[in-house]
Amino acid sequence: MPSITKSSAIEKTLRSLLTREGYRLNRTRVNGETGVDILATRGRRDVHIEVIGFKSSPPARSRDFMQSFFCAVSRIKDGASRCVIALPHRWKNGLPQRAKQYGTAWRRIGRAFPELEIWLVDIATHTYSKSRWNDWLSGDH
């Protein structure tokens, strides 16, 4: 059974990295509080970030991913120039298959929401990588 990675660990790591890069961040939300997980601002650009972890249950992972997608794109109404889904690095293994499975629908989502990105956060190496939504269709990750 795959081990879990809590969203709180991903958020903590990403907050640390973004602060080092000169972003101003919103405060960490308390349990039960609604709103964007991380609002990162540098200059006039706001990056709205939804953070999810890695659960041992594949159906739970799928549900979390779909929910984070809708939360991320809903931030457009708040003026987001970049809408990000931040995931544990281990999602890298399944994202190409997920993109391929949805195929045309995945591509159309990327076209409809050009501000949508997926960031993979590695808490072990304290790094992250950025990609556009439709980058996952190429399989070059």
Image (tube, rainbow, N blue to C red):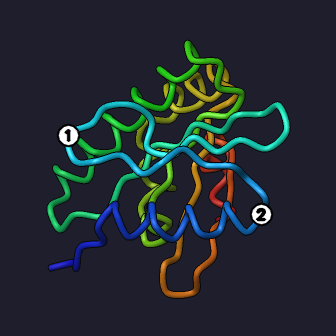
Q: What secondary structure is marked by label 1?
A: loop
In the rendered view, tell whether residue 70 sits above or below residue 3: above
Q: Give the residue number, with chain letter if any, for mark 2.
A: 21
| Residue 79, quarter of picture | top right
Which residue is labeled 1 in the image? Answer: 32
Q: Secondary structure at mark 2?
A: loop
Which residue occupies the extreme right position in the image?
A: 43
Q: Give the position of the N terminus as an image quadrant.
A: bottom left
Instruction: Locate residue 36: give its quadrant.
Output: top left
The answer to whether 124 is drawn above or below residue 54 in the figure is below
Dot 1 alpha-carbon crowd within 10 angstroms: few under 14, some 14 to 19, many 20 or more = few
Q: Position of residue 80 (x, y in %)?
A: 64, 25
| Residue 26 relative to residue 34: left or right | right
Mark identifier at residue 96 = none
Q: Earlier in the sequence, mark 2 or mark 1?
A: 2
Above or below — where is 139 with respect to 34? Answer: below
